[in-house]
Amino acid sequence: MLRLLSDSFRHCDGIPRRELLRAGSVGLGGLTLANLLRQRANAAEATLPVKAKSVIVLFIAGGMPQHETFDPKPEAPDGIRGDFGTIATKTPGLFVGELMPKTAMITDRMAVIRSMVTGDNAHSTSGYQMLTGVPHIPLSRENAAPGKPNDQPSFNALVQALRPSRGGLPPSVSLPRKLANNGGANPWPGTDAGLLGRRHDPWFLECDPTDPNFTVPGGELQEGMVMSRLDSRLSLLDQLRKPLDALERQVSTTVYDNYQRQAIDLVAGGRARKAFDMNEESDEMRDRYTRTKFGQGALLARRLVEAGVSLVQVQSITEDKSKPNSGGWDTHEKHSESLKGWLMPVLDQVYSTLILDLEERGLLDETLVCLATEFGHTPKINAKLGRDHWGRVFSIALAGGGIRGGMVYGSSDKHAGEPLDNPVTPADYLATVFHLMGYPPETMVHDVIGRPHPISRGKVVEALLS
């Protein structure tokens, strides 16, 4: 039995040596002392009004085509215009692709950026820029690996460093898996904390929220562990918290397993456990989000921000070998067939449902929703009836959380191939998001050896702000 008081030798932090050794062997359902030491970021205080208490990023992995979404070109030649027409929206003068009827009805809540530019035509390196705000060295290098000199922290990791945990959950969660090439075998650079160190890695959940038995990985009780027994151990942990905090300061450079550390709060905290209980949602609500991994991931994101997570990023990971391009957005062939058959119906339904659901719950004004991607698609349709990679201009959309709705920022040329005015870089986009979260771009975070780094080198796009 672990005793809290002892006459035996004490370290300068006040923990008896014998009890410290015993504490090291005590686990919550098998988790050791190292997993009990709570990691703390040296978080910078927000110095601006916080419009966006939470952020949800829907990241369209593979490239969201500008021509069939937010920047159609109905007057362009056949080989550029594509197979689909346009429809009017709730925003006067704004037309979107005909495959977005539900999104067309909510553009008054949205700001569309038609002039995003990375200048990079590779998934992994253009993605790196969209996730970090920093161009990859060199540009257009497919299957690039994480590491120096391309070790800038992702937006997710910066939020992990800046924001405290709330409700027993981490500040930043990314799901259903890391962004990667080749079926997940080659993670993109810029998906982790990079130079900030592993302690600021966002919490990556490899999961399938469509599974009837879905539960957060590592969040279940071990066999034989009942809640009453866990509660007893947590009471003991509370008594140890102060000396353990002192111990943590001495060993703060040690890397702990993020999944196990967060599992304690997930198992022990009712609010956190409830966030992952998708069965609390009605069948009607789950159907509204579509019974796809992307749709249920967006629903889970809404539940997580309700529970206190600051940032949730949901990747549109689709791997169906029976479909062209494995069912995903990297539509090098059969572009129109893929968009009409499954890609656009799901995106249109999921995105519009998330916006309206947040609004119905009174959360949209304080939750920023970013519909983003690594790049767009080529103006010219190729010989396989597909569109290829294009980072020279593309579109994204922002809604809620301090964004001025019903507007379009920037424009492209007559073929949606080059920016015509007001080009926006990923650094500008992220600077704007951070601004809405209360952090000016010059806010500093520190790497593993204490060097300061600004969270963004971009400029806030003031025209987007409400």
Image (cartoon, grey):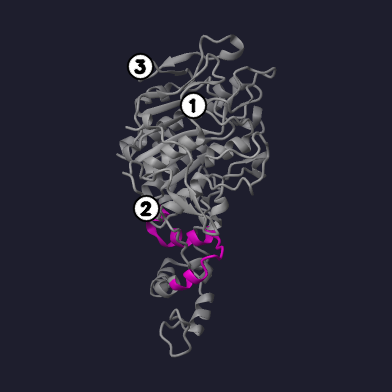
Residue at figure coordinates x 61%, y 39% from the top left: 136
Compared to 131, does 269 lie above or below?
below
- Amino acid type shown at disc 2: Glu
The residue furthest left is 362
Viewer-proximal residue among 423 and 273: 423
Could you tell me if residue 336 is visible in this image?
yes
Viewer-proximal residue among 253 and 37: 253
Between the C-alphas of marks 3 and 2, the distance is 39 Å
Q: Secondary structure at mark 3?
A: loop
Viewer-proximal residue among 136 and 406: 136
Question: Which label sits in the foreground, 3 or 1?
Answer: 1
Is the magenta region chiefly helix, strand or loop?
helix
Q: Secondary structure at mark 2?
A: loop
Between the C-alphas of marks 3 and 1, the distance is 22 Å
Which x, y percent locates residue 266? 45, 58
Nearer-N-terminus badge (1/2): 2
- Amino acid type shown at disc 1: Pro
Could you tell me if residue 318 is visible in this image?
no
Residue on which the image places disc 2: 45
Which x, y percent locates residue 132? 53, 42
Residue on which the image places disc 1: 423
Residue at figure coordinates x 59%, y 29% from the top left: 119
**Magenta stretch, residue numbers:** 246-274
| 1 and 2 marks in contact (CB < 8 Å) | no
Which x, y percent locates residue 32? 53, 70
Number of labelled discs?
A: 3
Is residue 261 one of those drawn in magenta? yes
Between the C-alphas of marks 1 and 2, the distance is 30 Å
Disc ID at residue 92: 3
- Amino acid type shown at disc 3: Pro
Residues packed near mark 2 inside 10 Å, few (<14), some (14 to 19) or many (20 plus): few
Viewer-proximal residue among 398 and 115: 115
